[in-house]
Image (cartoon, rainbow, N blue to C red):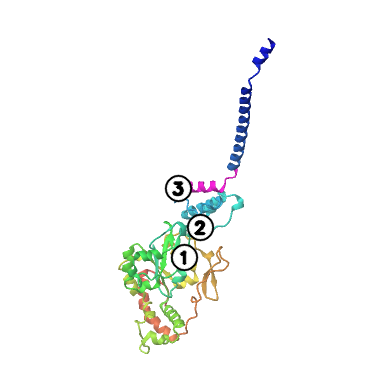
Amino acid sequence: MAYRLISNRIVPSSNRLSKRFIFIFTISLSFTYLCYSILFCCGTIMPTQSYEEKMCLHHKNVGSKKLLQKDCTADRRTALDETLNVALTHQGSSHARNQSRNSALPITHKRSIAPSEYNITVAQKYGNKKLPNALIVGVKKGGTRAVLEFIRIHPDVRALGTEPHFFDRNYDRGLDWYRGLMPRTLDSQITLEKTPSYFVTREAPRRIASMSPNTKLIVVVRNPVTRAISDYTQTLSKKPDIPTFEELAFQNRSQGLVDTSWNAIRIGMYILHLENWLQYFRLSQIHFVSGERLITDPAGELGRVQDFLGLKRIITDKHFYFNRTKGFPCLKKPESSSQPRCLGKSKGRTHVQIDREVIEQLRDFYRPFNIKFYEMVGQDFRWD
């Protein structure tokens, strides 16, 4: 009797094996869950590079125009820094830019960032090639290279460094060819190019107006006598066997007959060329830079250029210093360079010495042209 009771209470061997299997399986499942939980927590605290890349791709798809970042695989600080810089530069407030960056980034990551550094890099990667909004159309030996080099440090200006000569020599190549030469720009940036010979090219105003009648034009003018001597000095450096300045400037010096067919003389008759431009453009679309003031007050002249182009005045006195050797202002050392940036060796070249009487005769010749020019543009450049 007792044996039966005991045998009935004892679990069969097959049931014992099943319970043992269930116990082991439960322990294994619990251990697996524990490991997964540990790994998940680590992944949350320290995201992997793959996770960062996926998140960056997601953000680019959501708003690629607003998040113009250098590289999605860059660290999060660099991406945030670029986004803030681009957005705040378009607002035109350096104070807001500094405040936003300082509040958004940890103290250990704060650094000085030039607006142009990111805008140019972003434009090169994400911008489009566009026909220019503005042109420096003249005049030769007036200071056009200086204006170009000075204005292109503005973060909202992208300029072609070489002279394309499209509207005078290469017009038959077409606008698509011309557009292809331009640097990439963002929608908010100005595309600019310089070719000083446009100002004296008869067909240039009509051709430019055909491209866009709203194009803004910059003309750098200088005392026409000084400009002619500078022009001759440059030519002489390339062709030492040319006739003297006096021989080229006059048909008959004793009678005071100036040779207006010589290009160095004709360029300085500014009013004649301006009348041609005013057939296609309003005077308000043309800004005149004084070549003399560009030397004595580069910040003031560049301030007016920035106003004309509708830009915030970012280029100021702090960007310039006067190079006494060249007799010309240079750009101070930018953060990304170890050297100041001056114009080339051909700029600031010592002029050929011209007889004083020759200079006086040319001043007398240019005086009536200068007076008409002053009246037309509403400025007295004080060349007399």
Picture layout, residue 146 above or below residue 310: below
Judged from this view, the residue extending furthest toward the right is 2
Q: CA distance from mark 3 to mark 1?
A: 35 Å
Q: Nearer the viewer, residue 33 or 125?
A: 33
Q: What amino acid type is highlighted by mark number 1?
A: Ile
Residue at 60% over, 35% down: 32
Instruction: Point out residue 130 in the picture as x, y percentages from the top left corner.
Output: 39, 61
Circle 2 sits on which residue? Answer: 118
The reply to whether the magenta stretch includes residue 346 is no
Residue at 39% over, 82% down: 362
Circle 1 sits on which residue? Answer: 151
Instruction: Point out residue 319 in the picture as x, y percentages from the top left corner.
Output: 53, 65
Circle 3 sits on which residue? Answer: 61
Residue 330: in sight, yes or no?
yes
Instruction: Point out residue 347 in the picture as x, y percentages from the top left corner.
Output: 49, 75
Local secondary structure at mark 3: helix
The chief SS type of the magenta part is helix
Q: Residues within 10 Å of mark 1 (few under 14, many from 20)?
A: many
Specify the segment rendered in magenta.
45-60
Instruction: Point out residue 150 in the picture as x, y percentages from the top left corner.
Output: 48, 67
